[in-house]
Structures are given as structure tokens and as C-alpha cells.
Amino acid sequence: MEDNNSTSDSPTGSQNPNPDANLSSESDISIDALARKVQESLSLAKRHKFWETQPVGQFKDVGDPSLPEGPIEPPTPLSEVKQEPYNLPNLYEWITCDMNSEDMCTEVYNLLTNNYVEDDENMFRFNYSKEFLRWALHPPGYFKSWHIGVRVKSSKKLVAFITGVPARIRSRDAVVNMAEINFLCVHKKLRSKRLAPVMIKEVTRRVHLENIWQAAYTAGVVLPTPISTCQYWHRSLNPKKLIDVGFSRLGARMTMSRTIKLYKLPDSTATPGFRKMEPHDVPAVTRLLRNYLSQFLVAPDFDEDDVEALASSKGRRCG
């Protein structure tokens, strides 16, 4: 789930603007915070029974310098990969979701809009548009078979969804073909049915069938075991609306008019020459992006095709 604050695949590396100061850098602070979260999670190990059976880093191994770098498990011969889907409870069936179908895309949109990531008070959820979902799930070289749904056999109602898309992730100097797992969603009324673990196993099986053996995902909670964290900064574009609906609140000693004035965007950009990217900019943007990402130990390995797809107008709005 991309819009959360703890990730297993997002590059980090906040730089200290004053490296000579006797203060911890932002990256040190985030690592310390992550370490505390991991320690807190150790006492909750019983909550991670599924992940303790999977080939992922485990909390008990955090900080062990004897562990070798590389895959936890070697690739399996393709002939030994399970050919049939994992079994679901009898009332449900697997489907492959064709996001180019308007009807199918609408079903996925409705499921996510009503059941995907939400706040603790169940007031706010992501509202990804159908156009955005198509864009996010159709990167260069995507596999339709990695867009997986679960239906109720009798009613054909879509009640669960999980996806993977191909990615190249650089870890130090090694570039690894991976799957990015996203949009794991189970209908609220079925959260007790333990569908998520079997869905994760099924998308893993389908990824393996394409001879890809590593995957990355993000989460807003500490699961075994993060390799990186990512911080988000937000700027309110319509503070009055956000305050009116309860998403934000007025700061201490702040009035609505002062808040609106504070967050008002400038009439012109401060950076000379700042403009919308155009198709002929793809090579230069790719060079800039790759150079920026080179400072991180873990980062996506984007080429010009990736940048062109990322900059597509279909991805410029998310709701």
C-alpha cells in the first residue's frame, strides 16, 4: 500500500544539512524509530504467524552481521512451481481482472473505494480513479495474470483484490527483477476469513511462473521485516474543505482566514524555467532521476520507457 509510512522497497537517505553538527541526522532518527518499532513488534510475534513461515527477513535476525547478502531462498526450477491455484474457501473463486474492461475496472474501483486503506475512525479512504488504477497496473511489461480477484461463486460479487507489477530494483550494485505487490484489499465483512494469506501465496505463485523470485511491498505497520522507511510530507491545497470534513483541524491560535492565506499557493513558480515535462524531455529526466537515485543503497532502476510511462498524463491524477 503505497501511501503509508513504512516500506520494504522505498529508498531512503535523508541528508544532514550540517554534517559537522553534533546532532543526529534525519536518517539516524528514522532508523532509531524503526528499531524501536521492531523491538515493540517482537512482543507481538504471535500476530505474524503467516510471515514467520515466509522467506522474508525475521525480527530475530535484525542486526545479525553473519547473514549473507542475497536471496533468502534460491530460485526453484520452473517445473517445480505449483501449476494450479491455491485453494480458496468453497464459497469463493479466483478471477483474473482485466483492467481494460470497463465493467471489471468499475468493480475493482468500487471495492477499493469502500474497503481499501482508511483512517482509524473509518472516516476517510483513498479514492483512486479508474484511470489512475489502469495507469498504475499497466507499466511496461505488465502481466495481466498478476491482477487477481476473488469472487463469491453464487453472486459473482468481487470481494478481494491483489496485484503485482514488474519492477527492477537495485540493491547496492545488483539490479534484481522483482514484483511490486500492491492494492491488497479484502471486503470489510470478510476480514475474518483469512483470505489475505492465501491471496499473497497465489500472487507469489503467479510471479514465480514468470521466473521472478523477489518481491517488494509497502505497509503502514511493521511487518517482518522492513529494509527501509519512507517519510511523507503533505501540503493542504484546500485547507477549508479539509477542516470542514474533519480531515484537518485549525492550529492553535489560528483562524480559518489565516490558515487559507498561509497555504495559498504563489501565483508564479520560484524556480526559473520550471514547466510541465514534455515527451522530448524523457532522456534528460531519466538521467536526472537515475543520478538522484544513485545515492541510495536500494532504489528503483528506471529506464526511459519507465519514465515515459510514469510521466503519462493518465497518472497525473489519483482521484
Image (tube, rainbow, N blue to C red):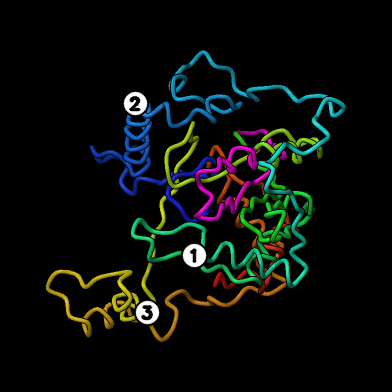
Q: Earlier in the sequence, mark 1 or mark 2?
A: 2
Residue closer to the observer: 242 or 315: 242
Label 1 sits on residue: 126
- Point out residue 3 in the picture as x, y percentages from the top left corner: 48, 56
Q: Quadrant of residue 286?
A: bottom right
Decide which of 271, 182 is in the foreground and name it: 182
> Which class describes the residues within 10 Å of circle 2: few (<14), some (14-19), or many (20+)?
few
Q: Secondary structure at mark 1?
A: loop
Q: Three-letter amino acid code at disc 3?
A: Asn
Q: Residue 227 in the image: x percent, y percent?
A: 50, 35
Mark nearest the camera among 3 and 2 is 2
Mark 3, secondary structure of its residue: loop
Q: CA distance from mark 1 to mark 2?
A: 31 Å
Q: Earlier in the sequence, mark 1 or mark 3?
A: 1
Quarter occupied by residue 67 = top right
> Which amino acid lies under the numbered mark 1 shown in the image of this protein?
Phe
* Residue labelled with disc 3: 238
